[in-house]
Amino acid sequence: MCCTTILADPTPVLKRLKSFVPVDAFVYLVRAGCFALLLALVLSPLACKRNPMRSGEFGYVAVPQATLRDRVAALYNRVGAVRNGEKVEILERQKRFVKVRTSAGLEGWLEQRYLINQQTFSAFEKLAAENASAPSQGKGTVRAELNMHITPARDSEKLYQLAENSKVDILRRATAERILPGGAAKPGVVGDRSKRPQPPAKSAASKPGESKPPESKPQAEMVNAKAPSAGAASTSAEPKLMDDWWLVRDPQGHVGWVLARMIDIEVPMEVAQYAEGQRIQACFALNSVRDGDKDVSQYLVLLSPPKDGFAFDFDAFRIFTWNLRRHRYETAYRERNIMGFLPVTTATRSFDREGTLPIFTVRLQTQDGSLSDRTYRLSGPIVKRVLTPGEEVQKLAQVHKKEPKKQKHKKK
């Protein structure tokens, strides 16, 4: 019997009181004004085991679909279902179950883990509002059913699900340390480049007589990687497992972080075959040329090493133009050994004698650690840098430092 039911109809309680207390004493206590105290003493074993209803508490369904049951028991009847993102009012709680009411007035029980609270839902709404007009960095196809997280971490809150083979817009990249089951530390985001990167830190020199610990190749090649402390044992430094994440936006406008390896970037097969073992991070159509009875697009392609965890989004980009004589794609321009960051923008601009041409702007890191936007134009098969009046050419940071060539001494 629930507390609210007892207060609404106290007749059963009065009958039980008479069974515990003699009639004369009962009448005396009531007349003396002690009925409330006696009622509280008797209600203690009848108190509700469920939490009372919280007025105005809502939750949101965080699974593709959940069944509403008429009772919390091994055998129950299905009274309805709720779907992903649906708002429900929470009426009661009992252990790991909650009783909810849908917007259609349907009431039933479901597991509490299927819901997220209002605070988490508001965080997703804020993330969607902040990225509503963010430029798309390409289209992607979801490999399998995928959760959208509020932050780039496997254990972060999730709400919406992406169906297999659904299409999404890619907005931004981040990389975070993968925490295995039982790990205590929270993964820290390394590669979300919404903030400007800091200048590369100089590695500390080893003291004389101390052996230098071996560096793994990817970490040694990253400019922003932390240098190992001098004299540290090589066996104590275990490589960290990293995950790349994409911030994506679905056709309904929902925004969230997903594992990058679960998204296939849409790239034409004729262009993808020239990746040369690198990972294609983005592909932009700049313009198109007429070849016979069809229009063929020309592309800007961003590339990176085939591994998660780098501090940059791409370390090379290539322009693929269409050869009208040989009817194939060819590399018109290439930049390598750079540290590039999203977003990349494409547009058109009018140039006096050359007319309106496609342009693109890439964001690259300079040697002093700042970011520099560089604009290029495509005129036929030729790519040229577009400089603004008074712009100074800055030296770019390099992923792989080039060693000076050794001069050969001529024999006398």
Image: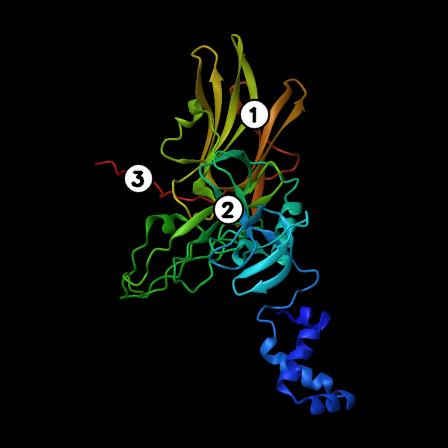
The residue shown at (47%, 28%) is: 267
The residue shown at (44%, 44%) is: 398
Q: Secondary structure at mark 3?
A: loop
For disc 2, the neighbor class at 10 Å (few under 14, some 14 to 19, many from 20) is many
Q: Are marks 1 and 3 in contact (CB under 8 Å)?
A: no
Residue closer to the observer: 185 or 344: 185
Q: Residue furthest left?
A: 412
Q: Is residue 393 visible?
A: no
How many marks do you count on the picture? 3
Q: Secondary structure at mark 2?
A: strand
- Circle 1: residue type: Leu
For disc 3, the neighbor class at 10 Å (few under 14, some 14 to 19, many from 20) is few
Quote the CA–CA distance across marks 2 and 1: 32 Å
Pick whichever of labels 1 and 3 is earlier in the sequence. 1
Pick whichever of labels 3 and 2 is earlier in the sequence. 2
- Circle 2: residue type: Asn
Residue tagged 2: 147
Q: Nearer the viewer, mark 2 or mark 1?
A: 2
Residue tagged 1: 286
Q: Secondary structure at mark 1?
A: strand
Q: Is residue 256 visible?
A: yes
Q: Quadrant of the N terminus?
A: bottom right
Give the label on residue 407, or none: 3
Pick whichever of labels 2 and 1 is earlier in the sequence. 2
In this image, 124 relative to 111: left or right?
A: right
Quote the CA–CA distance across marks 3 and 2: 56 Å
